[in-house]
Image (cartoon, rainbow, N blue to C red):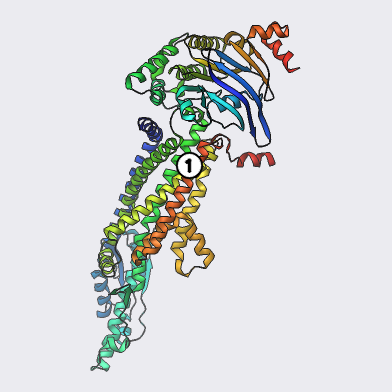
Amino acid sequence: MKKFANLLKKEIKELVTKQLIFTLLFMVILYNFIGQVSKKEVQKIVGVQTISALDEDGSSGSQDLLKKLASFNYKIIDQSGKTKEQALESAKTNDSKLLVVIPKGFGDSLAALKPSPIETYSFMRSFSLIGTRGQIIVDRVIADMNDVQSNNFLKEKLPDFDPKSLKNPIKSKDFIVVRNHVAQGSANQVAGLMSQQSMLIPIVLMMIVIYSSQMVISAIAMEKQNKTLETLLTVPIKRTSIITAKMLAAGLVGLISAGVYMFAFKGFVGGMTGDLAKGTQAAGGALMRQLGLTFSTTGYIVLGLALFLAILVALALAMILGVLAEDFRSAQTMIMPLIFLVMIPYFISLFADMSSLSLPAKILILAIPFSHPFLVSQNLYLGNWGMIAFGLGYMFVIFVVLTIFAARIFSTDKILTMKLRLGKKKAAAA
Amino acid sequence: MPNVLSVIGLKKSYGSQVAVAGIDFEVRTGEVFALIGPNGAGKTSTLRIIATLLTATAGDIKFLDHDLCKDPDFVRERISYLPEEAGAYKDMKGMDYLHFMANFYARTPEEEKTFVDRAVEITKLGEPLGDRLRTKVGTYSKGMTRKLLLSRALMTKPMLAILDEPTSGLDVLNALEIREIVRRYAKEGTSVLLSSHNMLEIEFLSDRVAIIDKGRILDSGTPAELKEKHGAANLEEVFRSSVR
C-alpha cells in the first residue's frame, strides 16, 4: 500500500501541472466572461426595445396597433409628420430595431375587412437569431389584430355564435402517456424537454473521457519518451499497481478537470439562456413530474454507476492505446479512436430511435460500451430495468477484459516491444 | 565465492530474429562481471531478461537459487537496473527523485533516509551535484543525470546491480568518476553485471569478462587470463582474436 501511495502521489503530481491549472483557470474566466457578455445582450433583448412608427393614417385602427405593440414592452418613437425616407433616416440614428409604416387608408380598409397592408423595416445591425426578435413580435401583434378583427365581424354577423368556435370547430386536447402516467401536453414539448435534460450526459461523458484518457495515454507516453519506464518496471511494485495508480490518478484529475470545465460551461450557458428559459423550465418541470419522467435517487445512482463504468472502460482502453504510443506527440493522436467511440452513440441517439434501428445498427450501437450511459438514461425513464442491467453488466465485462489485457501487456515483453508506427510506415512507403 | 546469478542455456528471439542464441555464465558475490561485444551482440537483451523486463525464450536463470522467471518479485527487491538510455522524471527535483525511488525499497522511513543519504554521498563524489539536487532534473546535464541515476541504482546496496553501458555518452572525467563509484560498491559487496563495448573501461572495472557476439559467448575469464590465452596486449585485441 505504501508503494502504491508513493506511485499514485507521483502520478497525480505529474498530471497536475502549472499548465493544466492555468488552462482550467483560463477556461473558467473565459466562459464566465462570455456568459456575462451574453447575459447582458439577452437582458437587452428581453428588456424595453425601441421601435419607430410612422402613422400616416392616424385612425383608431392604426392607434390600436401601436398601443398593442407598446403593451409588448416596446418603446414607440412616433415619427408622425415625416416622410418615409425621413423616418427611415431618423430610425437608423435613434437605434430603433424596427420602423413600422402604417399607410393612409389602413383604418378604413380594416373597418371594411379588406387587406390592410403595413410596412416594416428591420434594421439588421447584427445577424444573430436574437436580433430578429422584433420582427417576430410585430408578426404576432398583426396576427392578434387579424384575429380580433375577424372575431368582431363574426360577432356582428352571427351574434349567437362564439367566433372562436366558428373558426375552430374541431378542438384537440393532447395527452401524453408514459407507462402508467397520463398528462395533458404535446409530445413535441416532452421530446424537446427530454433532449434538453439528456444533453448534459453526453457532454459530461465526453469531457471526462477525453480528459482522463488523454492523461493516461500521455502518462505512459511520457514514461517512454523520458526513458523512465524501464526503470519503473524493474522496481519492486506489482505491474497491476502501476496500471491502477496511473488509471486512478488520471481518473481523479480527469474528473476534477471535467468538473471545472462543466462549472465553466454552466456559467456560459446560464448567461446565454438564464432569463429566457426560466418560465418554460418551470412549466416543463411540472409536466415531466406528472409523467414520471424525472430521476429518483435510485435513477441517479444507476446513471452515476453507468458513467463511472464508462470512464473505467475508457481508462483501460487508453492504457492499451498509451502502450502503442511511442512518444508524447503520437499519444495525442491515440485519443482519436476513443473520441469517435463516444461520438457515434451520441449522434445516433440525437437523430434516431434505438428501437427502430435495423438489427446490424442496433448490434453496433450495443457493442460500443459508451452507448450505454445514453441508453441507461432513456431506459430509466421508460423503466426498462432488463436493458439497464445488461448495459451495466456489459460495460463491467468490457472493463475487466480490457484491464486483464492491459495487465498482460504490462507483464510481458509487449510493454517494451508493442508500437504503432503509422507515421514511420508512411514515411518508409514514401 | 557463491553465485548470485547463474544463467544456463539462455535464448531470446523476437519473432524470427535471434538476439541471444544460448549462453551460459554466472556472477559471483562481490564481483564485477562484464559482457563485452559490439552493438547488436545480445548484451542488452541479456541484461533486460535478468532485470525481469523481458522473458527468456528458453533457458534456466537462477538468482540466489530462486527461479527468475517464476519469482520476479523476489528478484526485483534485490536487484537494481540502470538501462543504457535511462532518464529521470524531469519535473521532479533530484532529491525528490531519490526519495521516490528509495520508497519502493525501504521498509521504514529510517531505511529510506539511509538510502537517500547514500545516494547523496555518491553524487558528491568528483564534481558534486550539491545544491543541484534541489533543482529539477530537467535542468541537469547528461553527466549529472547519469550520476543521479547511478546513485539511485546503488543506494540500496543491491545484491546485483545491472548496469548497461554505465558511462555511455559521458566525457572522460564523468566516465572515470562513475567507474570509481562502481568499483567501490563492488568492493563493499554488491555484485555487478555490466555491459559495454568500451574494452578499456571493462579492463579497468571487471573481475571477469565474457565476450559476446551474435548472441553467443565466444570466450570468458579474467582480463589477464584472456590476454594471456590470446597472446594479446589488451581486451580489444582479445575481442578481435575471439571473433575471428
Please identify the quarter of the rendering in which residue A167 is found. bottom left
Please identify the quarter of the rendering in which residue A92 is found. bottom left
Q: State the image coordinates of residue B137 (x, y, percent, origin top left).
A: 44, 23
The quadrant of the picture occupied by the N terminus of chain A is top left
Q: Nearer the viewer, residue A415 or A47?
A: A415
Res. A98 visible in picture: no
Determine the residue positioned at 58% across, 35% down.
Answer: A417
Horizontal side of A183 relative to B84 (left or right) equals: left
Q: State the image coordinates of residue A314 (x, y, percent, origin top left).
A: 45, 47
How crowded pointer 1 is (Cα within 10 Å; few <14, some 14-19, many 20+) is rated as: many
In terms of secondary structure, where does tag 1 sit? helix
Please identify the quarter of the rendering in which residue B61 is found. top right
Horizontal side of B205 relative to B39 (left or right) equals: left
Determine the residue positioned at 44% across, 11% down.
Answer: B128
Q: State the image coordinates of residue B15 (x, y, percent, origin top left).
A: 65, 37
Q: Nearer the viewer, residue B118 or A17?
A: B118
Amino acid on which the number 1 mark rests in the picture: Met
Horizontal side of A290 relative to B62 (left or right) equals: left
Q: Nearer the viewer, residue A349 or B207?
A: B207
Q: State the image coordinates of residue A93 (x, y, percent, origin top left).
A: 34, 59
Vertical side of A333 occupied by B18: above or below: above
Determine the residue positioned at 45% across, 68% down.
Answer: A355
Vertical side of A252 occupied by B32: above or below: above
Res. A420 visible in picture: yes
Determine the residue positioned at 27% across, 80% down.
Answer: A61
The quadrant of the picture occupied by the C terminus of chain A is top right
How many callouts does the rendering have?
Answer: 1
- Residue on which disc 1 sits: A319
Mark 1 — on which chain does it sit?
A
Q: Nearer the viewer, residue A240 or A281?
A: A240
